[in-house]
Structures are given as structure tokens and as C-alpha cells.
Image (cartoon, rainbow, N blue to C red):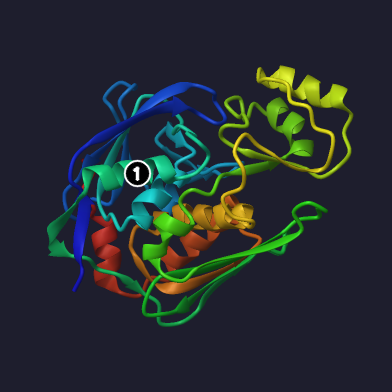
Amino acid sequence: MMKQKTIKESFSLNGKGLHSGLKTTITFHPAPVDSGYSIKRVDMAGKPVIAALAENVKHTQRCTLLSVDGVEVATIEHALAALYGCDIDNCLIEIDSPEFPILDGSSIAYVEQIQRVGVTVQAKERLYLEVEEPIEYLDAETGSYLKLLPSDEFAVEVQIAFDSAVLPVQHATLEHLSDFVGEISMCRTFVFIKEIEQLLKHGLIKGGDLNNAIVINDQLIEQQEIDRLADIMGIERKNINKMGYVMNKPLVYVNEPARHKLLDVIGDVALVGRFIKGKIIAYRPGHRVNNLFARKIVEQMETESVFEMREKRVLV
């Protein structure tokens, strides 16, 4: 049987929030068995702790946001994907702002630190969620569809489909969780250039730039309009004379957007609170449907011992 794991030492990272633009320091600490992932807001009175569980998700507009008794923390998905992808069961995360740092838009900075400090194997056995019957979620409004199938190990298949000449249909596959570090963790978030102004009007992506996101230009836009958007965001102007990807670093994979969506699926499904033996198939996933899917998985947990342990987890 597999034992539970935590990180061997604490580590910290600094950055800015993608949506808030706020500077933040985030620190990861070892945590005891059965504590799962928890997040402490050290900038708030009493330093409240939130359990990273699907039912604590309040908003899913362009990120996953947890909220308990008025205490919120946003954009948690890349960090949780790193913990899950590095096979970590238990970790306490301290943060001094309401949003995790976006870093380079992927999970790689977290992964590199986990690898640097190492992993501690703990005394207690890991209790898996083993899937006996398919669990499905269909979103009639968007056509998004997610399914969890029985399997001896965790795997994910993703297909994305946009009405876009630049990014129409892409696939990505994770056959083994051990492949996450080398094949998924470095894949960055993306945004369509036509979405940027509306996102800014809604108070989002204040910390977005070409160092932490891939911008997809799939329509002809006057350079004057592109310059205006850059000025609104407070970033350097960039000449864009053709449709395609706009970024400061080249794609790490041709299907990097699909791989990033797979990364997001892992980060959102990590909120089930248990390592899963099962295969996820996701068509047009997104944070909202990912969370509804994760909640459905929780609802259909049949193993009482799994459910009880999840509910009784220790907040550290």
C-alpha cells in the first residue's frame, strides 16, 4: 500500500496575482497525515485556515476561488495541480494576500521547489478513491462534458474546442500521474486577445502580461487598438502584424493550451480531497464545470472510510 506524503521542508515563492495584480508571498509547509491541502491567510486577523475542498469553491470566473465564512483565496488551481502531480497528500499553504501568485502561468515553479526540498513518506497509508462505476457531468448550456471511469491508476484525457482559426481543436493526454512533471507542469495559461478588454472591465487580469500568459490573436486587429490594450494593462507595447500566438517565450508543446487545460482539470479535481484511481475524460473543461464535476464525485463517494476521513481532516 502507498503511504501518505508531505514535503520535507518549507519553501516560499513571491509573485503577483493574475487578477488582483497584488504582490504576494506564498509559503508551503509540511503537514500531518490526513490533513490534506489547507490554506492559511496570514494577512488576516486570526490567520484563518480554509480547507481546499470542492464544496468551498465560491467563484470560478477565470480561476478557482475558495471562500469560507468570508475568508477568500483565489487562483489556487496551479499550485494544487503541482501538489497533486508531485504525489503530495498533505500540505499547509500560507499566503499574505487574497490570491495565489500567477508566476509564469503554469505549475513549474511550484514543482521545481517541491523537487528541491524533497518529499517525506509518512506513517499512515493513503486511502484512494477507487471508481467502481462511471461518474459523468454534462453541462447543457456549454456542451462541456466530464467523465470519470474505473482504472487502476489516475489518467486524464482532454479535448478543447474553440470557435477560432488559431486554436480550434486540441487534445492532451496524461497516461500516468508520474508524467505530470515532465509533460504538463510547464504549460501556461492562455487568453484570447478579444477577451482582454471585457476581463479588465470586470476587474480581472490586472496582473496579466506576456510573461505569465499566452495571448491568442485570432482576428485582425489594428495596431492602434493593440497599443491601447497594452496601455490599459500597463505593459510594454508589442507590434502584432499577423494572427497567431503572442508570447515572450515560445510554446513548449504544439498543444500547450490543451495541456494547460489538463493541468487545470487536475488542480480543480484535487479539491475532491483524495487521490483518485480512475480515468478522467474531459471535453471543453473549464473551472466552473470542473468544480461541478468534482462536487459530483464527492457526492458519489461510496466508501464510508474515505468520506469520513475527508470530513475529519485536521486543519493546521
The C terminus sits in image quarter: top left
Can you give x and y, in whole percent of width and height, for residue 255 in the image? 63, 57
Can you give x and y, in whole percent of width and height, for residue 289 in the image? 59, 57
Disc 1 packing (10 Å; few <14; some 14–19; many ≥20): some
Amino acid under disc 1: Glu
- Residue drawn at x 74%, y 25% as measured from the top left: 238
- Residue drawn at x 80%, y 26% as measured from the top left: 226
- Residue 304 makes an appearance in the image: yes
- Report how many numbered discs are placed on residues in the image: 1
Q: Quadrant of residue 245?
A: top right
- The answer to whether residue 303 is left or right of residue 74 is left
Question: Dot 1 corresponds to which residue?
Answer: 112
- Is 245 located above or below residue 221 in the figure? below
- The answer to whether residue 115 is left or right of residue 189 is left
- Residue drawn at x 44%, y 27% as measured from the top left: 15
Q: Quadrant of residue 11?
A: top left
